[in-house]
Image (cartoon, grey):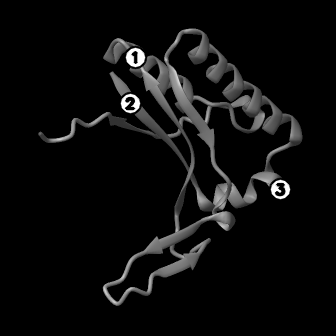
Amino acid sequence: MKYMLLMHSNKQGWDEMPNVWSPEDIGVMVKYMQQLDDDLQKAGELVETRGLSGPDAMRTYQAQDNGEPIITDGPFGETKEVLAGYWVVDVPSEERLLEIVHHISITPGPGGRPLNQAVEIHPEGVAPA
């Protein structure tokens, strides 16, 4: 079954990362994520993955009845969390899914300590007939 796994970051942490994390800590995190992606690819479970740009690069589009869309630039003052990246995986069992999600959650942060971040799990939906 296919799942989309969403990894969020809080906006403050995202903005502070370059100033708070050492270059070595950032390197450890990136290497960990690359290894996870490589392992999923080798297992035939990775459908797609992407790390996303920061909130300064995001925009929101909303159609309006009058035909003039509202397009706003980020970041937004009220934003507390940002979508940092995602994986789409195709796994044979719930047990395997939770193993993968655990590895995402324990991504190393400063000093190698696990971030223990929340990961949203979205199962593939079935379109109504």
The residue nearer to you, when weighing 79 against 4, is 4
Disc on res. 19: 3
Q: Mark 1 and mark 3: span between their CA atoms?
A: 37 Å
Question: Who's the residue at 52% across and 64% down the image?
Answer: 80
For residue 84, above or below residue 36: below
Q: Position of residue 14 (x, y in %)?
A: 67, 55
Q: Is residue 121 left or right of residue 47?
A: left
Mark 2 near mark 3, Cβ–Cβ under 8 Å?
Answer: no
Mark 1 near mark 2, Cβ–Cβ under 8 Å?
Answer: yes
Q: Is residue 121 left or right of residue 22?
A: left
Q: From the image, which quarter does the C terminus lie in?
A: top left
Q: From the image, which quarter does the N terminus lie in?
A: top left
Q: Around disc 1, counting alpha carbons within 10 Å, would you say few (fewer than 14), some (14 to 19), or many (20 or more)?
A: some
Secondary structure at badge 2 equals: strand
Going by the numbered disc 1, the residue's amino acid type is Val
Q: Position of residue 54 (x, y in %)?
A: 67, 57
Question: Who's the residue at 63% across and 31% down the image?
Answer: 107
The quadrant in which residue 122 appears is top left
The residue nearer to you, when weighing 123 against 65, is 65
Q: Position of residue 93 (x, y in %)?
A: 33, 13
Disc on res. 3: 2
Question: Who's the residue at 67% across and 28% down the image?
Answer: 33
Secondary structure at badge 1 equals: loop
Q: Mark 2 and mark 3: span between their CA atoms?
A: 34 Å
For residue 52, above or below residue 108: below
For residue 52, above or below residue 106: below
Pick out the residue farthest to the top: 43
Sooner in the amino-acid sequence: mark 2 or mark 3: 2
Question: Who's the residue at 67% across and 64% down the image?
Answer: 57
Pick out the residue farthest to the bottom: 66
Disc on res. 91: 1
